[in-house]
Image (cartoon, helix red, strand yellow):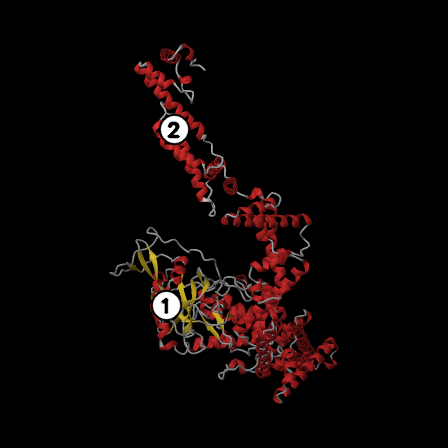
Amino acid sequence: MGAYTLAAAGAGSVARRAEPLACCNSTTCGPVLGTRATGTSVSLRANCMPLLTEIDRAMLQPGRFAPAVNRLGGGVIAMADPERPWRVVGASAVVYQLRQASGRILALRCPLTDIASDDPSFAPRYQALGLSAATASLRANHGPLVRDITLHEAGLMLPAPGFRAMAHPVIAMEWVTGRTLFEAVTDACRIGDRFALREMAATWIDLITTLRDASFDHGELTPDNVLLRPSGELTLVDYDSVAWKGSPQPPTRRAEPNYGHPAAQAAPIGIRDAFPSLIIYASLSVLARWPSLHGEFGDPPGQVGGALLFHARDLADPRQSAVFATVRARADWEIDQILEVVQQACLDQAAEAPSATSMASRFETSTLPAPAATSRSDASPAHRRSLEPKPPAPSGETGPDRQAQFTHLNSLLLAGDDEGARRYWLESGLASDPDAARELGPRIEDVARRGLLQRARAAAETGDAATLLQLWQRGRFADYRPAAPLLPMVEAARRRISQVDRLRRALDANDEPTVIQLWPKLRGEALASTLAIRAQEVMAKHVGGQVAAALSQGDDEQVVAAVTEAEASGVAVGVEARRARRSAAERLSTRLLLQEAIAADDREALVTLALSRRLDELGPQEPPTVRVVLQALAWPHLLHALEARDDTEIVAAYNEELFGDDQRLTLDQRARIDLARKRVSWLAAIRAALRRRNLVTIRDLLEKAPPGAERRLSQVERTRIERFAARDDAVERLTAALRDGSDSSILAALSQVEAAGATLPEALDWAAVRGVVDRVTLAEAIHAATRADPPDYGRLAHLLPAARAAAATAHGSAIDLAAMERDLLRTAHLARLREALQGEDDAAIAAAARPDPYGALARLSPEQRERVERALSERQSPSAAVSLGA
């Protein structure tokens, strides 16, 4: 997300959680400073800090709540995730990134305090800072100040009490790519890069000198408020307290404790940077000699106002400080002078503290070889200074008592204070005294020689070959017995210098292979610093080609190796290459995890890789690998289905291609899977037959049902099968009855078809069915006429001929037409008899009684038969009388 570091968010700032900084409500907010006569009230509120969540919400909808974005030409706010904008939160401000279509990137700095109320000069000072001719040179390309500084007083519209909108300022400026000076120093100390630290110390003097010449006062100098650009320039950020000649004056603020004067006094505007610039310069100078001291005494990155070397407690009492004591024990003349200046500055008033530039002007920046020339054409004087220490010349003052001086010098020598003795020898003027030189000169020379030897040992420990050889020659240590242990290191230093010469010749001859071989070994060597630019160009070309080739081939291992080698070689690697290396490394890691999981049959690991979508980054895989991954994904579902004993779920989870040869499945599990597959297949077939109403198939399937399959049918399905079977049986019975020709069987079959709701077959003999129906209907009509009381003989007389004709074609009719006809004639005869009996005419009665072919007389009542017998006896002779009962 770029490297506009936490420094942009505020002095001594560190990342914090996105939590509200204050609660805005009607009881705590100050009065409204102004409103606009619009639909929505707009105000600038006093004494109320904005909520970070409110600013986040505004940045999520910049078109509506961030007018500054539109005034800047639009763009897109960088996002950390779909719900939250990316931002850097500091102690006094939060910074967002605005990316525009033109490719320009801006930093949007939003104060987290009511800055307008706390500092009335805030707005005019920021406006002047971005437009003033006095600061134009500082805002030049890669200058001490960032470019394109603009203040938008109503840059954000935040919610305020009473459904109003509150205007909140936004400061837009150039997005600076780089690390804070604190981070750069920490990294350099971690790897022991003394060259980079010396360069930073020299560049720091350039920065302070530029600010002094422009009469510019930052007011809050800390390593966290200084960015180190990739090109090596230093740029200041956080301008809430800046001042320059003719600018609106900022409020007085106390400096960070580790960079503020221990007297806790605020220095006057114009010299506020003196003390912190001195502390930072002293820290850089000491760390350039002994980088490991930062890890021992300094603060880690991210700590608010973290110390490079000196803490507030050290500045409060330098005499009791462990840092001062440790540095003094190792210090050369220059570092000792720096410590004395810092110590005195801590004891003096804040306004009297010397600046870093005044300190640097007293002696050379370093006793070590000069750093390589920078790419800038305007290399600072600090880069062109001579390298040998120049202690002050003897004052020449002999004093009234030469013997007292001898005594004091001897006491220092006896006490073992060699450095004190040497310093006193130079400062007291004894060095110019022939008698003193003759008497004490050899001892002082030995003291100086031991001092050089101590410095040579330090150079050997730090691997500074140039300084070691320089001190070896100055001290003439070849025959100096105490220096004998250094001889192997001196020889190694000579070899390194020889390699530097070889590197120089290779560069002159364009011998790239030799340069590529030697430069990684000599990168930290001071003598090779003058060759750094040329050698680094060769390395950049070499490793750049390797990176490009690896990227074009798409070989992940080559990409990682090439980009790693490029970074190790100090070559600036582009964002795309770093992203490609990160992606390649992730793919390599994923491949390794995949191989390990497959080898160990770790299905949980395979599932994790698949569900995390890490396998998607690998692209298409070999079929065996895909099969193993799919098997791992399906395995839990299959086990769950087997435990649930659900046939459908088992069949859905089982894949023959995946689990056909899986040894993890037991025989019982395979039997259960086979049974589930048979049941599901059977159910599908029988349901398909039900939809087709294919009873033959249904009956066949029912006979071949797998164990327990019928229980999987629903009650509705079973009822439908039973109904289909009943209908089929009824139709078959009707067909058989029609084939046999029995009316009763046909009628019974028709009743069964009707009860079952079956559909009559298309090939039904409808004529036969109609004849049966007609005959049955005629029989029922005849039966109804005969069952009438009295019988309906008139209807019977009409029905009997039709019944006789129907009987000729009937097969198995239930009606006895002959008996029915006899009954009809008998009934008619009875009707004649009864009619004659009613007339009381013996002749008519006798005529009606005889003959009696149908047995009608037997149907008369006893009284009626007795009357008929009397009538017959009167009409016939006694011999002709016949019993009516015969």
**Identity, as a three-letter code, of the amino acid under mark 1:** Val
Q: Quadrant of the C terminus?
A: top left
**Identity, as a three-letter code, of the amino acid under mark 2:** Ala
Depth order, front residue of 406/480:
480
- Mark 2 lies on a secondary structure that is helix
Residue 340 in sight here: no
Rendering coords of residue 491 (x, y %): 72, 80
Q: Nearer the viewer, mark 1 or mark 2?
A: 2
Label drawn at residue 249: none
Q: CA distance from mark 1 to mark 2?
A: 106 Å
Crowding near pointer 1: few (<14 within 10 Å), some, many (20+)?
many
Depth order, front residue of 15/241:
15
Q: Which residue is mark 1?
A: 69
Marks 1 and 2 close (CB-CB < 8 Å): no
Dot 1 or dot 2: first in sequence order is 1
The residue furthest bottom is 509
Residue 758 in sight here: yes
- Mark 1 lies on a secondary structure that is helix
When asked about the image quadrant of residue 91, the answer is bottom left
Residue for point 36% across, 30% down: 797
When asked about the image quadrant of residue 386, the answer is bottom right
Rendering coords of residue 35 (x, y %): 27, 60
Eyeballing the image, is 745 above or below 490?
above
Depth order, front residue of 598/837:
837
Rendering coords of residue 331 (x, y %): 61, 72
Crowding near pointer 2: few (<14 within 10 Å), some, many (20+)?
some
Eyeballing the image, is 523 above or below 847?
below
Answer with left or right where residue 395 lies relative to residue 852.
Answer: right
Q: Which residue is mark 2?
A: 784
Answer with left or right where residue 842 lies relative to residue 767.
Answer: left
Depth order, front residue of 732/546:
732
